[in-house]
Image: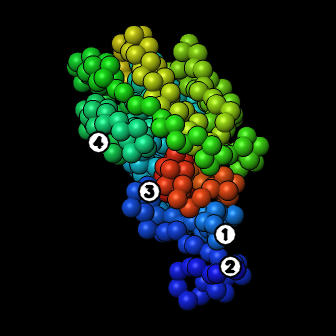
């Protein structure tokens, strides 16, 4: 005997035997999204449908009525845990369209700041799972460099807004020497398995994709100049379960700490930006740029008509693709296991409802 469960009196009209609407409230998630779960009497999920749109930000339309300098101040807001990487993707698009040469010091510092951004973002998701408490220290050195705690606004077209403060590199080394991402709890083994073929079908990238055997990392496969010579080896696992996802996050924190140290060892002197005209105008045409953001591939398709504002600026955000994979990995999960599975599956909803 099966019963119907849902939110409101209309649940029985949904055409399924038993439905549980999870959300859109989010006591611990990064934004409000909703999961519609079909559940058997033994509380095993048989189908899952992620429903988004509760946090729509309209970023892409806002870009079209702002000049390129103003676009950078908005580009870090759709994924607030990848602010520096989001700014960088837009700056790269304009720089490539204009043929701008970015100073070498700025390129290496961009790699340093991207990796610090990755460490900070991963530690946010790891904190409730491994007990790590090192995020604030990493966030403090990012704030010291940029003046912003969440929205850094430190990239500029042609480099960085300014150089890092005196003594900053030593403080970064000191902070990272104490970073401990913890260890993944073994109780996550076998939960919420996402197979490699499903990950590829949904376009899943980042640590979630690599935990399912998708060997793709732009720091190796299409590296920015600041990563030249670092020979990044992606952290890849084959199991595709919650444990593999958390282990990927843990190992990537340690990898980023190492990459920052190697970048600082070869940090050159010189300027960190170029002199810009009063109005920055991208020539007519289009370009696509991408960076390896903390949660996966963050891409920008910029189309220009030669004006100081973009004609179209389309975002390819990792969480938008990744969240759809919940429909493949949640069936077979018990309702009681949902917190652990969802905790291992890192998304930022602003990045979905961009």
Q: Which residue is mark 2?
A: 2
Q: Which residue is mark 3?
A: 29
The answer to which quarter of the image holds residue 31 is bottom left
Q: What residue is rendered at 45% in x and 24% in y?
A: 254
Q: Position of residue 177 (x, y in %)?
A: 32, 19
Q: Secondary structure at mark 4?
A: loop
Disc 2 to disc 1, how far (Cα)?
Answer: 8 Å
Q: Which residue is mark 4?
A: 148
| Mark nearer the viewer, 3 or 1 | 1
| Mark nearer the viewer, 3 or 2 | 2
Q: Secondary structure at mark 3?
A: loop
Disc 3 to disc 4, how far (Cα)?
Answer: 23 Å
Residue 84 located left or right of residue 98: left
In the rendered view, tell whether residue 41 sits above or below residue 3.
above
Q: Position of residue 205 (x, y in %)?
A: 63, 41
Disc 2 to disc 4, how far (Cα)?
Answer: 53 Å
Q: What residue is rendered at 60% in x and 54% in y?
A: 323
Q: Which residue is mark 1?
A: 40
N-terminal of the two: label 3 or label 2? Answer: 2
Which residue is more in the foreground, 56 or 19?
A: 19
Q: Secondary structure at mark 2?
A: loop
> Are circles 2 and 4 on residues that touch, CB within 8 Å?
no
Disc 1 to disc 4, how far (Cα)?
Answer: 47 Å
Q: Residue furthest left?
A: 166
């Amino acid at each position: 005997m099966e019963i119907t469960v849902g939110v409101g009196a209309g649940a029985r009209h949904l055409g399924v035997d038993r439905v549980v609407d999870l959300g859109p409230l989010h006591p611990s998630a990064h934004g409000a999204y909703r999961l519609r779960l079909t559940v058997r009497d033994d509380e095993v999920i048989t189908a899952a449908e992620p429903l988004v749109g509760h946090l729509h930000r309209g970023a892409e339309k806002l870009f079209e009525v702002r000049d390129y300098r103003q676009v950078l101040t908005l580009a870090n807001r759709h994924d607030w845990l990848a602010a520096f990487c989001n700014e960088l993707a837009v700056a790269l698009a304009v720089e490539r369209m204009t043929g701008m040469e970015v100073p070498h010091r700025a390129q290496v510092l961009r790699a340093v700041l991207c990796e610090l951004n990755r460490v900070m973002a991963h530690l946010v998701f790891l904190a409730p799972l491994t007990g790590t408490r090192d995020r604030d220290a990493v966030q403090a050195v990012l704030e010291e460099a940029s003046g912003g705690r969440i929205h850094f606004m430190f990239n500029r077209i042609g480099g960085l807004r300014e150089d890092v403060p005196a003594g900053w590199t030593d403080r970064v080394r000191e902070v990272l020497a104490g970073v401990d991402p913890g260890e993944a709890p073994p109780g996550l083994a076998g939960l919420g398995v996402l197979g490699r073929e499903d990950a590829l079908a949904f376009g899943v990238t980042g640590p979630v994709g690599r935990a399912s055997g998708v060997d793709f990392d732009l720091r190796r496969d299409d590296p920015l100049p600041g990563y030249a010579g670092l020979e990044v080896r992606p952290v890849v696992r084959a199991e595709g379960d919650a444990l593999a996802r958390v282990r990927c996050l843990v190992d990537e924190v340690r990898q980023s700490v190492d990459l920052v140290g190697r970048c600082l060892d070869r940090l050159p002197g010189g300027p960190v930006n170029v002199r810009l005209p009063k109005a920055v105008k991208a020539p007519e045409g289009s370009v696509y740029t991408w960076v390896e953001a903390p949660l996966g591939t963050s891409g920008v398709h910029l189309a220009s008509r030669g004006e100081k504002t973009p004609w179209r600026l389309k975002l390819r955000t990792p969480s938008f693709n990744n969240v759809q994979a919940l429909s493949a990995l949640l069936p077979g999960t018990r309702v009681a296991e949902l917190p652990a599975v969802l905790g291992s599956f890192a998304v930022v909803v602003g990045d979905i409802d961009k």
